Amino acid sequence: MDASDPAFWRAGAISSTLVMLVVLAFLTVDSLATIKPGGANVPHYNVINKEISYEFDSVASRYRPVIGGEQLLFGRRYSAEEAENTMRLGKLVIQSRNCMNCHTFFGNGAYYAPDLTKAWLDPAWQQMWMPMTQATSREEAIAMFLMNPDKYPTWRRQMPNLGITRPEAEAVVAYLKWMSAVETNGFPIHFGHIQTNNK
Amino acid sequence: MFRSQHLALKYFAAAMTLFGIMVLAGLLASTHYVQDGFLLNKLDFSITKTLHIDTMIIWLLMGFIGSVYWFLPVELERETEGVRLAEVMFWIFCVAVAIVALVFIFVQYGPATEMSLWFINQGRKYVEAPRWAAIGIVAVVLVFVYNVVATAIKAGRITGIMAVLMVDLIPLFGLYLIAFPSITNMSEDQYWWWWLVHLWVEATWEILIGCIMALALMQLLGTSRRIVETWLYIEVGLVLGTGILGLGHHYFWIGTPSYWLGIGGLFSALEPLPLLGMVVHAVYDAGTHRMKTTNKPAFFWVLAEAFGNFLGGGVFGFMMTLPQINLFTHGTQWTVSHGHFAFWGAYGCGIIAVIYLALQKARSVQMLDSVAWKWSFALLNTGMLGMVGALLVSGISQAFYERAMGGSTLQAFIAAQNNVWFVQGIVMRLVFGLVFAAGYVMLMVDLLRIGKRRAVSETLAPRVAGGPA
Amino acid sequence: MVATSLLLGTFVLMAGCYGALYCFARLRRDRRLAHVAVACYVLQAITAALLMVTALDFWWKALLLASLAAYWPIPPLTWRFLERLHIPEEQMP
């Protein structure tokens, strides 16, 4: 077989493809273990009972989620099963309302509306929405906004009213809180902190 | 012409119709950016954007399927097996697409239940079509695969190109099963979703367009089978050798282990190398065979394919793929810039080339040429380059002001969206979108008329000369 | 960051220009075009040098240098391969 014989290149194509597929299979097994709830990078769903923040880790040299002490959501302590059911509902809301075609999740989706990876930690909830909605907690403000976004706009581009019910809104809030606790290798960089110098 | 080739022409017509709907939806989506409150709560951005990207995927898929129905009987020297069933499936496909689009537009949303996912919208990018329609697509595809495989079996022979194509169809359509499940864990959802999207557009689709281009080159330039097959195997080896683990460039930020930053970045950085080889190949073919082209538009669209693939996928991809950079560019208009350019260069141009090849045969024209194709070629490519450039400006400003400076909060998002460079880019995108739309109109005019005038004038000539009426 | 990514895009773009112009030069047997092609490669090398002083990590810089070395022979090797591949066809009546 020489280089102008198709069979030579066919053998090369088959072998390189097979090698890559085998490597991908191994990496997939490992990755799935890392990303399952309770895995190294993704917390159990009942992390929604805890305080979550996002801080710079000088050892890892990147921003990382930090799970703190108890911080109940809607005044409720969710059991593991309740948390999972709430997540299931929250994800169904996100899919049925097609959120991914305006927003991004982990930076994937559409870019018409903000990224929601760390939205739970956005200072705007306390600074803008809590006063607007007269809510006494962050989660209450988010839920009220989701149910009636037309009542609480913050700038010229408005979120449409998607007919989100109260249980659906609470589920989405819980989902956003859980998502903010996922280890994303530092994305988005320095969330909530403004840089004054060039990077 | 084989019956399968008549079916191919129907697929091409449907593809071009969806292309038009894609352009219209794109113009609407662009207007959402430029005019606040545009069709708010009537036809929101999420709907127009869904229509835009889904019609793109379907028109390209129809183009692929049409191309295979066109070349298959010629390759295997017999009529496609089960072509009558395929004709029925074509109409089912069209009706299903129409129903899905109408439900997107007029029903839009349902409650957070499985029923909504079954009948209205699944809400995962590119695979929003409700499950019932996804099942329909699977049915259409199964018949398609049956057509291809059964024809090869009945013919009792297989060519290298057809073998690659058939083997490629297995993962191509197998991956579509990822469109069905609803996975609660967003990390896991996106892990598998990227298998579907990346291993489609940066692996199995690349192979498929490679096979189609191989078949097209044999017809267009009279290139020998041995040459196109050799080149096809090299392409498959390089594209899959870099693209399979290049999948990792989508696994930087979704919760997956950090070794993907290295692996994904490395293989992604290697992906432009085979594309450079394809540019060399295209120039070589253009140079050595130029005088023998009997189909000017197809020839130029094939060249556009080679260069567009390299520029849109290779150059623009490389600009944003290294993880340290991607941390800032991820989820911005920069991605949109790259995406538009890559899809157009890698697939759009290639399908248009094949349609011109098919029309030459269908209208029995020796030398296919016109004025209109040049106008449409110029307008479409200028429009695309303009949109891509405008989106790059917006994307750069967004990466800087929202991510690097602003910390990606709502306030940072708003500041970037209001930034003068961002706004200028997003306005120019709409302007060039209109240029692209004009190009589409010219393309349709040309596709409907090219190669037909000679036949008309030949029948008129005897009359003018006083022959029988 | 913006400068780095634009440099990265320029890096691959210059590789493409080098490759395409190399081919045109071979087709037309035009020495000047060949020189322009080499000039593009030199620009690619300069871009690589500029990338060495960015904030990219060490291994990415090493990858860029290795890619630079790899891009040089790709057009001539591909061209030579294509010529060899086409020879039996040209020998046919």
Image: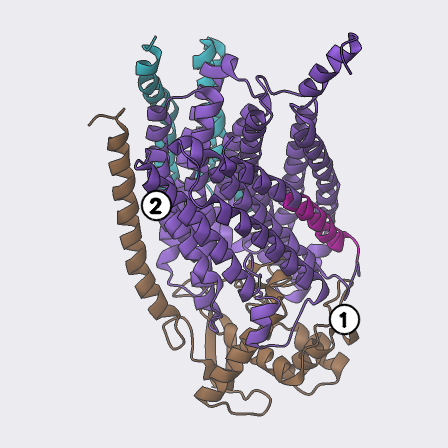
Chain colours: A brown, B purple, C cyan
Contact (CB < 8 A) between labels 2 and 1? no
Q: Chain of mark 2?
A: B
Please state which of the two labelled residues, at mark 2 or mark 1, is closer to the viewer.
Answer: 2
Judged from the image, the secondary structure of the residue bearing numbered disc 2 is: helix
Q: CA distance from mark 2 to mark 1?
A: 52 Å
Q: Name which residue lies at 35% across and 11% down.
A: C90
The answer to whether dots 2 and 1 both sit on one chain is no
Q: Is residue A21 above or below residue A97?
A: above
Judged from the image, the secondary structure of the residue bearing numbered disc 1 is: loop
Q: Is residue C56 above or below residue B43?
A: above
Q: Is residue B325 above or below residue B384?
A: below
Q: Name which residue lies at 62% across and 40% down.
A: B13
Residue situated in front as seen by the camera: C8 or B38: B38
In this picture, residue B45 sits left or right of residue A23: right
Magenta stretch: dominant SS? helix
Look at the image and give the residue range highlighted in magenta: B18-36
Q: Amino acid at mark 2?
A: Val
Q: Name which residue lies at 55% across and 18% down.
A: B294
Residue A82 x, y percent position in the rendering: 49, 88
Quarter of the image for the C terminus of chain B: give it: top right
Looking at the image, can residue B263 be seen? yes
| Few, some or many residues within 10 Å of mark 2 (<14, 14–19, 20+) | few
Residue B141 x, y percent position in the rendering: 47, 52
Q: Which residue is mark 2?
A: B167
Determine which of the numbered discs, if any, sits on residue C74 in the image: none
| Few, some or many residues within 10 Å of mark 1 (<14, 14–19, 20+) | some
Residue situated in front as seen by the camera: B98 or B403: B98
Q: Which residue is mark 1?
A: A153
Q: Amino acid at mark 1?
A: Pro
Residue B165 x, y percent position in the rendering: 38, 41
In this picture, residue B257 sits left or right of residue B438: left
